[in-house]
Image (tube, grey):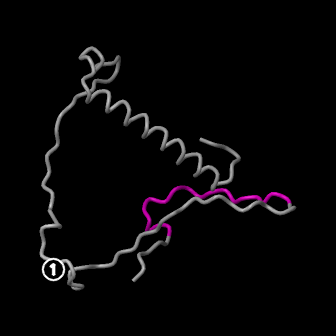
């Protein structure tokens, strides 16, 4: 965990680490699925098991256009999105301090976030 770092910068670092970890996970999974030797499926504390999950998929593209274009069949939903964008350069001023973060809330509702109506 980063210490003494602005929360926006910490979020950027966390997302960067997650991207790198997901890329490495994809590499390892591809290697296992491509036929890794059986001796490489078991480590000192963990074992890789390869299986299949089956699930039904609704084929929306087979619905008639009349149903797809019917506005009564659609609902607009909203959810919060947090984006990270490069900040403009700071002007000649002292760095801004930041407040200590409160403990993580149990759910989005605890943050006072409600879906727009």
Relative height, residue 99 to residue 50 (above, below): below
> For residue 108, which quarter of the picture?
bottom left
* 99 within the magenta span: yes
The front one of 23 and 77 is 23
Label 1, on which residue?
67
Q: Residue furthest top?
A: 39
Out of 54 and 4, give the one closest to the viewer: 54
Residue at image point 32% right, 32% down: 29
Magenta residues, as a range? 94-111
Q: Verify whether residue 116 appears in magenta.
A: no
Quadrant of the rendered structure where residue 91 is? bottom right
What percent of the width, then of the height, locates residue 40? 30, 17
Classed neighbour count for the residue bearing mark 1: other residues with Cα under 10 Å, few (<14), some (14–19), many (≥20): few
Rendered residue at 39%/83% (across/down):
117
Report the residue at 64% width, 51% height from top. Answer: 9
**Front residue of this view, candidates 109 and 70:** 70
Horizontal and vertical percent position of residue 7: 63, 54
Count of numbered labels shown in the rendering? 1
Q: Quadrant of the N terminus?
A: top right
Query: In this orientation, which residue lies closer to the viewer: 58 or 82?
Result: 58
Tell me which corner region of the image, top left, top right, bottom left or bottom right, holds residue 68. Answer: bottom left
Name the element at disc 1: helix
Q: Residue at x 14, y 51 (%)?
A: 55
Q: Main secondary structure of the magenta part?
A: loop
**Residue 41, position as x, y percentages in the image:** 28, 21
In the picture, measured across the screen, residue 88 lies left or right of residue 50, that is right
In percent of width and height, residue 25 lies at 39, 35
């Amino acid at each position: 965990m980063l210490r003494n770092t602005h929360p926006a910068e910490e979020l950027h670092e966390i997302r960067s680490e997650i991207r790198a970890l997901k890329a490495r996970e994809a590499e390892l999974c591809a290697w296992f699925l491509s036929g890794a030797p059986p001796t490489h499926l078991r480590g000192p504390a963990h074992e890789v098991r390869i299986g299949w999950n089956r699930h039904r998929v609704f084929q929306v593209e087979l619905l008639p256009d009349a149903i797809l274009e019917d506005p009564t069949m659609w609902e607009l939903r909203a959810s919060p999105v947090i984006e990270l964008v490069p900040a403009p350069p700071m002007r000649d001023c002292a760095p801004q301090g930041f407040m200590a973060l409160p403990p993580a809330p149990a759910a989005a509702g605890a943050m006072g976030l409600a879906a727009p109506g």
